[in-house]
Image: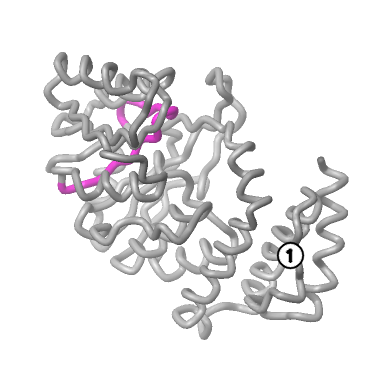
Amino acid sequence: MTVSICIPTYNRAATLAAAIASAQAQSYGDLEILVLDDQSSDGTEALVGEAARADPRVRLVRQRQNVGLARNFSACITEARGEFIKFLCDDDLLEPDCVAALIEALARPGVALAACARKLVDDDLRPLRVAATRRRTTLIDGEAMTRELFVKGNTIGEPTAVLFRRADAARGFDVRYEQAFDLEMWCHLLRAGAFAFVPAPLCFVRIHSAQATRRNIHAGSIIEDKRRLFREMLPRLAGRLSRTERWLWDLRMASSLGRTRAAGAPADAAGISEIFHPRAFRALVPLAAMAWAVAR
């Protein structure tokens, strides 16, 4: 059963070599290592070419033009030859047993998506904390996990942490989502089955996306992603959300608007209809803005 370790990349030659090396060091034997280069200009092509000459498992596909993050991730799925997809972001690393452990988890009956805990690190790989969906090995029904993602955000984690079947993801990532394109994909995959969680922290995820997050806050992308998620998922979840889950959604939306206001970007609570308790929501937004302003 071939696993395609897919590394979408753009101008990250400084960290890409280490990412590729961590893929090559996997204990699982049947691998391809696919690098999707989104028209980098920093020597990425030469770096991957050298790795491919030394290791036939490494393959480079270079976009003809820059297509952006979500489309480049989708191209990985299209170009992959393996039955299974294991993403590895170009500045992250895998522990040697990551693929083997996730393949074992995905092999359990009815499982559509597997993920492990993540070691969150800074730019220099200094440890920050371990992020985990649960404390122990867990199998969660797909619908229940989808509700959790909807109301709590991406508790499964970044693409580097997951593994799934290529056939289940054939439609690709939804490019309409700027910040939450991975979360939306996890929800899509969970329509096919359950979620299996491996508590061992089997990957390193660099946390240095504050600048991109600030751009998305000022552009309104985070709020728009949440609004779109509400409109598209509510028909599927409406009759199943508890009172607590509905309040959690409103609190997260209020927090996002408050953060946007605290960052100095316009955010009109009156224009938000993708909530469950409008009157309480509009009272929460200025409180959230004050809390974010104090926390900055």
Q: Choose between 123 and 198: the one closer to the eye.
A: 123
Residue at left offset 75%, top offset 63%: 267
Residue 53 picture quarter:
top left
Left or right: residue 246 compared with residue 39 = right
Residue 173, above or below 117: below
- Extreme-bottom residue of the structure: 239
Percent across and percent down for residue 135 are 52, 45
Main secondary structure of the magenta stretch: loop
Magenta stretch: residue 34 in it? no
Return the x and y of residue 91 as percentages of the image width and height: 44, 28
The secondary element bearing badge 1 is classed as helix
- Side of 54 where 65 appears, left or right: right
Q: Is residue 84 magenta?
A: yes
When the figure is inspected, residue 199 is found, relative to residue 186, above or below; the finding is above
Residue 116 seen from this side? yes
The residue sitting at 26% across, 21% down in the picture is: 48
Q: Nearer the viewer, residue 204 or 73?
A: 73
Residue drawn at (41%, 63%), measured in percent from left and top? 187
Give the residue type that dot 1 points to: Ala
Start-end of magenta stretch = 83-97
Q: Camera-side residue: 113 or 40? A: 40
Q: Position of residue 73 (x, y in %)?
A: 34, 46
Looking at the rendered structure, the number of numbered marks drawn on it comes to 1
Which residue, given by chain and number where applicable, does mark 1 sit on? Answer: 254
Q: Quadrant of the N terminus?
A: top left
Q: Is residue 56 above or below residue 165?
A: above
Q: Position of residue 21 (x, y in %)?
A: 30, 19
The quadrant where residue 34 appears: top left
Q: At 39% across and 30% down in the image, what residue appears?
A: 90
